[in-house]
Amino acid sequence: MRHRWRPNLRTRITLTLVAVAVGVAATTAGALVWNARLIILESRQAAIYDVLRVESKVAAEGLPENPTETDLAIAAEEFSVPAILINLRTSESGGTLALNEIPEYLLETLVDGGGMSAYERESKYGFLTFTAGLIVNPGDGGDPIAAFGMFDMQSQQEEIDRLVNLGLAVGVVFVAAAAIVGLVVGRQLGRPLDQLVEVADGLGSPEPSPVVDTGYPDVNVVLDAMRNSEARLQSTIVRLEQSEAASRQLVADVAHELRTPLATLVAVSDILADTEAATTENRREAGEIAARSATHLTTLTNDILEMSRFDSKQAEVVRRPVDVNELWAGLQESSRWQGVSFELFGEPTIQTDAVRLRLIVSNLVNNALRHGEAPVQVTAWVQSGRLTVTVADAGPGVAPEHEARVFNRFYKANSARSDSNESSGLGLAIVRENARLLGGEAWLVPGPSSVFAVWVPAG
């Protein structure tokens, strides 16, 4: 099997420099020639306009107020170039230039369009011509006359051709010089390649790669890039280790949260099993404790399942019209909160996921009642396409050292509650994840009191 030829680094450098040289030479020469062409043509065109203006004025002075075709033809003979005069009122024309030789654009501009002057360059009869026209005699009582002249620009074309040939010659010399420079540079860069390979071989060692100055800035850039890649790899390894540690911590946190309600259930089962010693009151209290523990286990399990859906990207959003007042009324009826007031500003109907919005508000209010103090004020307002909800309680607020972590999973600002059946430490984390899933955000409002806020899109 034949292998396709691949150029080495030296050859590629040479070819690259040659390609760059070709591009630079072509661009530079093209720009210079183009600008020179414009200067040559525009200077010639300015002179042509001056000649046409003077000769048109002289010709117009000899015309009567209402010139005939014969008058126009005689006056056109005064021009130094083929010319034609057109009476714009009568459309009569005469001159040494045929009417069909005038570009249609000029006729449309001056004769039909009401313009005062116009020109057009074109290759005609094998050379470049410049046809210009202007209006003479307008507004002085006589008929307005359109004067057109055709000027030869062959000498300017020849000058432009010479510039193009000169640009090509300079480009060839430039490309040849670039090829020579490419060969020299390729050989110079070949010397530190062995040193570069030697340093690269040591990048896989456990020890950090030594800082080596090869004496070549370009090679040093490559070495720096390798060291940066090594640093990013180490950073990735650290993140993986942190992720593994977080997973272990999650298992430990879940086990810790399960320990208390399970231990409670075991103790309660012992009480219920001792039918001889347990009184009716003991059994009633044990049943209530078991019910609370079971409720806590159910809540904890549901919260963990909800967080797992976020982690696995399986959480879904079902948007539909939601009446915020009705949603709050349903929450209040099912939860039977005491000391909680609600106020809404703005249009009550929004487009969102009712289940997730209900979960957000419910968790914020439960958090305020559980860790704060009544009364709790829930304020919602719809403005600028957003629904913003704040939940404020009369408690002392969150200590500054805990503010940055209150939305973390299983984080409890009060360690005394770590064994409580009242909280799993996931409520605020679920609030934030649901808010972000809906396209919003949740945050703690800094201040002396405890105020949590969340916003979600309203449409």
Image: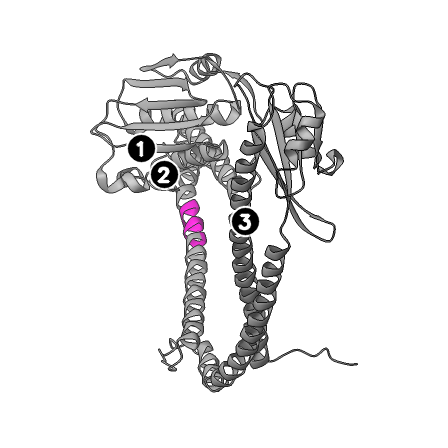
- The furthest residue to the right: 1
Circle 2 residue: 407
Q: N-terminal of the two: label 1 or label 2?
A: 2
Q: Can you give x and y, in whole percent of width and height, for residue 139 in the image? A: 53, 19
**Residue drawn 70% across and 37% down?**
103
**Is 112 rendered above or below residue 46?**
above
Q: Secondary structure at mark 2?
A: loop
Q: N-terminal of the two: label 3 or label 2?
A: 3
Q: For label 3, count other residues whose C-alpha is less than 10 Å away and answer few (under 14), some (14-19) or many (20+).
A: some
Q: Which mark is residue 345?
A: none
Q: Which mark is residue 44?
A: 3
Circle 1 residue: 444
* Amino acid type shown at disc 2: Phe
**Residue drawn 64% across and 55% down?**
154
What is the magenta range?
A: 247-255
Task: Answer with the quarter of the image where residue 234 lies.
Answer: bottom left
